[in-house]
Amino acid sequence: MPDHDIPKAASTPPRLLPEVPLPPYGYVPGRFPHPIRDPAGHMHGFVPYPAAVPVPDEWRTCRDYLHAIDLWNHGYYWEAHEAWEGLWHAVGRHGLLADFFKGLIKLAAVGVKVRERRPAGGARHARRAAELFAITIERLRAATSAQDATRLMGLDVAELQRRASRFAATHEQSANEGPLPSRKELPPTESVFDFYLMPS
């Protein structure tokens, strides 16, 4: 997929946790040091603490969640994946919030695949993200008894479902672009979506 076909958001979004530094690079397999396993990785030696269990109506105080959004919005897709996976484990890996976080995990995986210049792989993750967001909406409506309920943790899950479905449909038949650029040629981060996650 040529670079000009990768949609770019118009401007840089505001940080939700500006006091928390962003990593020096967004990990792309085979092109940057593995953040944890490689001694040169930006998280080497870091021992993660268990994520706090988020309360949906108090998402503004969930620093793990806000940091994951900052990471995703600024092109750190592998790192956002890891952060959301911590939240997925914190909520027990089953149920409404687990499906929601798993959908976000898959959306982050889309970003990694696009940065690897493998848009067809990204499309598969996007399709799964759309399925998980659809399940989330069903669970949310059942839990609230409101048939129009689509917001969770400050995000419109129906809009996430639409965007994931659209990405999948657009890129399912894409051919991989070929060899990944060298580390010298690959930017440290890269926004590959035409939208940001802006909870409200």
Image (tube, grey):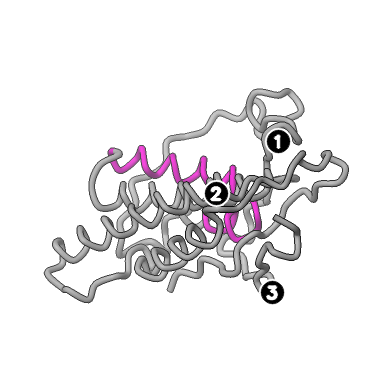
Q: Is residue 105 magenta?
A: no
Cα distance between the residues tagged 1 and 2? 24 Å
**Amino acid type of disc 3?**
Ser
Q: Up-down: is 69 above or below 148?
A: above
Which is nearer the N-term, disc 1 or disc 2?
Answer: 1
Q: Up-down: is 162 above or below 85?
A: below
Image quadrant holding the C terminus, namely: bottom left
Which is nearer the N-term, disc 1 or disc 3?
Answer: 3
Residue carrying label 1:
42
- Count of all numbered marks drawn on residues in the image: 3
Instruction: State the residue at coordinates (64%, 48%).
Output: 175
Q: Which of label 1 and label 3 is nearer to you?
A: 3
**From the viewer's perspective, is 131 left or right of 18?**
left
Nearest to the observer: residue 158 or residue 146: 158
Nearest to the observer: residue 148 or residue 130: 130
Instruction: Report the magenta residues as a range.
Output: 68-92
Element marked by disc 2: helix
Cα distance between the residues tagged 1 and 3? 26 Å
Counting from the top left corner in percent of width and height, residue 88 is at 37, 42
Residue carrying label 2:
122
Residue carrying label 3:
11
